[in-house]
Image (tube, grey):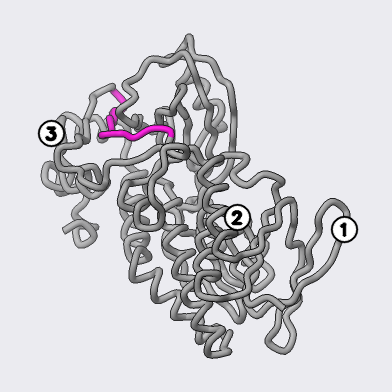
Amino acid sequence: MYDVVVVGAGPGGSIAAKTCAENGLNVLLVEKRQEIGVPVRCAEGISRDALERFVEPKKFFISREVVGAKIFAPDGTEITLSEEKAGNEVGYVLERKVFDRYLATLASQAGAEVLVKTTAYDFERKDGIVKVKLRRMGEEWEVETKLVIGADGVESRVAKFFGIDTTLKPDGIESCVQYLMTNIDFDPDYCYFWLGKSIAPGGYIWLFPKRVGANVGIGVMPSIAKKTPKEYLDDFVQKKFPDGRIVELVAGAVPVCGEIKTAVADNVMLVGDAARHADPITGGGIANAMKAGYYAGKVAAEAVKKNDFSAKFLKRYDKLWKEDFGKELAKKRKLQQKLIKMDDETLNKIAHSIPKNIKELSVRAIVLEIFKKHPKLLWDVKDLIL
């Protein structure tokens, strides 16, 4: 019998498995895909402090280090977030295919058993023990475990089976499409973001520089979009990068619903997208997934020590992630609801009035500048800003 079965070998799942193993637990980490980290489903950006909290940066999994960001209003007005006071918020662009495998390797080295191309397709909970039914290449078997950590993404099978409410309303999800592009002109020291309801309703278009080329992608809110995200992105690319060449395409969904009530049930904890831990404004989820994985691993070790796998005991995991970043998710969700209502004219007006060079690389810095110049726009959510 395992102490813990972790379902999903993304950053959250691998950090959870690694933390469990480091605390002496018998851990199984399963990943349904045959290659960990494939396909890449995000822009691959993470802040320096978030990465260094868990792993030492290595050149082989860092594609680029960026010193700032350039944000463009609908009319083309540019705002630059510079490196001068950015400190550890200056970010990395990862090579996720390599990074995710590295984290899984760290989990394995710590003592976790890792199985790829293995699907956890069903669960049975009885007498405080969970039977996890696994399938790989036509072979089916089951294992027993005291705990399940669900790190199985936005469509989490673990969450559904164990009855954890992670329901996404139409305005709580972003549909995303991303191209890896070459033969395009940009400053590789910066990330780029383009805003506007006309080009990316409810979201934005991004460019993250890579070692070769760049990730160019879009997130839109389907509930207010008039076209598919690919159609919006194709229109943008045709105008902005007419000579660019697409060498890879990925698509997916990102939960942007903010903090959920609980990410636990008897014998189970959820991390990452399965627990809706993505940032409601940026859509970024790597950092929070890693934090959640660490907390889940620590609580799993405590639960095994106490031999208590009840939801009541596991609530201490909820307490940890909510105190770390959950409250921030709730704040950003409210801000997001305000920001997506702004039309292009309002966004242009804001861009014209705030400094063209903001000395802090953060969403909060931008929102503070908006509030200073246009307090009426954000007055009803001022308590979230000040």
The image quarter containing residue 341 is: top left
Residue 333 lies within the magenta run: no
Q: Position of residue 101 (x, y in %)?
A: 57, 47
Is 178 positioned to the left or the right of 205 in the image? Answer: right
Q: Given this view, does label 2 or label 3 mark the residue nearer the observer? A: 2
Magenta residues (range): 63-75
Q: Which residue is mark 1?
A: 139
Q: Which residue is mark 3?
A: 355
Q: Position of residue 356 (x, y in %)?
A: 15, 30
268 in relation to 375, above or below: below
Is 291 positioned to the left or the right of 32 in the image? Answer: left
- Secondary structure of the residue carrying numbered label 3: loop
Q: Earlier in the sequence, mark 2 or mark 1?
A: 2
Name the residue furthest right.
138
Is 134 positioned to the left or the right of 256 in the image? Answer: right
- Please name the amino acid that badge 1 sits on: Glu
Residue at point 50% right, 27% down?
A: 232
Q: Residues within 10 Å of mark 1 (few under 14, many from 20)?
A: few
In three-dimensional space, the C-alpha distance between marks 2 and 1, rounded to whole angstroms, equals 20 Å
146 in relation to 109, above or below: below
- Secondary structure of the residue carrying numbered label 1: strand
Residue 64 lies within the magenta run: yes
